[in-house]
Amino acid sequence: MNSRGKLESITKPILGKGYIVTLRMDTLPVDLENKDLDIEIKVHRERRSKDANALLWACIHDIERSLNDGCRQTSIRESAWEIYLRLLKRYGKAVCIVVKPEAVEAVRKQWRESEIFGDYEVNGQKAVQMLCYYGSSTYDTAEMSRLLNGVISEMKEMGLQRPASGDIKRAIEEWEKHHGT
């Protein structure tokens, strides 16, 4: 069962191990009395709205059409997915990690996009330094807004009609209204 809530108090008993944690929750768990539980507590973080995501992909498809219409005489074409990955690299969020050389392919399968920066050495062992980009489905409001603004600036540079500022504003406001960020 998942529920949103707030930490009410933490008490350390004088005798015995552990802590007593009191939570105020939006919904009441039922049938949990006297059962062992797996408990995960993490800070609540809102994700981007589906409206903002739909707007992002509409813009990406506009860019794709424009690029590919200009390439009719050549076989060089760029898919919407390739454009999305390129835009994530420019405007998205990433993390730098160091992995064993044999783990590089597994890491690439787990991330939307990744780049190898080069060889590295950790405690005398070979390693690979990588920059791994998060997919937009993990973004919060501010991160999604930054990505959308970057995509829209690219559209402007290409001479494409960008979405009406009201559409952009509504997509972000809709997200904030529903998620409070």
Image (cartoon, helix red, strand yellow):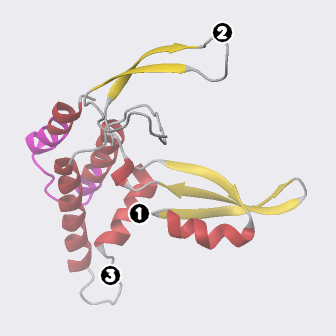
Q: Marks 3 and 2: which is nearer the front?
A: 2
Horizontal and vertical percent position of residue 116: 63, 64
Q: Is residue 159 visible?
A: no
Position of residue 115 relative to residue 37, above or below, is below
Local packing at callout 2 (Cα closer than 10 Å; few below 14, some 14-19, many 20+) is few
Q: Is residue 143 visible?
A: yes
Q: Would you say 109 lies left or right of 79 here? A: right
Q: Amino acid at mark 2?
A: Ile
Asked whether the beta carbons under mark 1 and mark 3 sit within 8 Å of each other, the answer is: no
How far apart are labels 1 and 2 at the CA level?
A: 56 Å
- Dot 3 falls on a residue whose secondary structure is loop
Q: Earlier in the sequence, mark 1 or mark 3?
A: 3
Q: Residue furthest right?
A: 124
Look at the image and tell me in which quarter the C terminus lies.
Answer: top left
Find disc 2 in the rendering and name its residue.
14
Q: Amino acid at mark 3?
A: Arg
Find disc 1 in the rendering and name its residue.
86
**Highlighted magenta segment, given as a residue range:** 153-173
Position of residue 11 relative to residue 175, above or below, is above
Asked whether the beta carbons under mark 3 and mark 2 sit within 8 Å of each other, the answer is: no
Query: At 66% from the left edge and 22% from the top edge, which residue is drawn?
Result: 17
How far apart are labels 3 and 2 at the CA level?
A: 68 Å
Horizontal and vertical percent position of residue 39: 48, 38
Horizontal and vertical percent position of residue 177: 16, 31
Q: Marks 1 and 2: which is nearer the front?
A: 2
Find disc 3 in the rendering and name its residue.
77
Q: Earlier in the sequence, mark 3 or mark 2?
A: 2
- Dot 1 falls on a residue whose secondary structure is helix
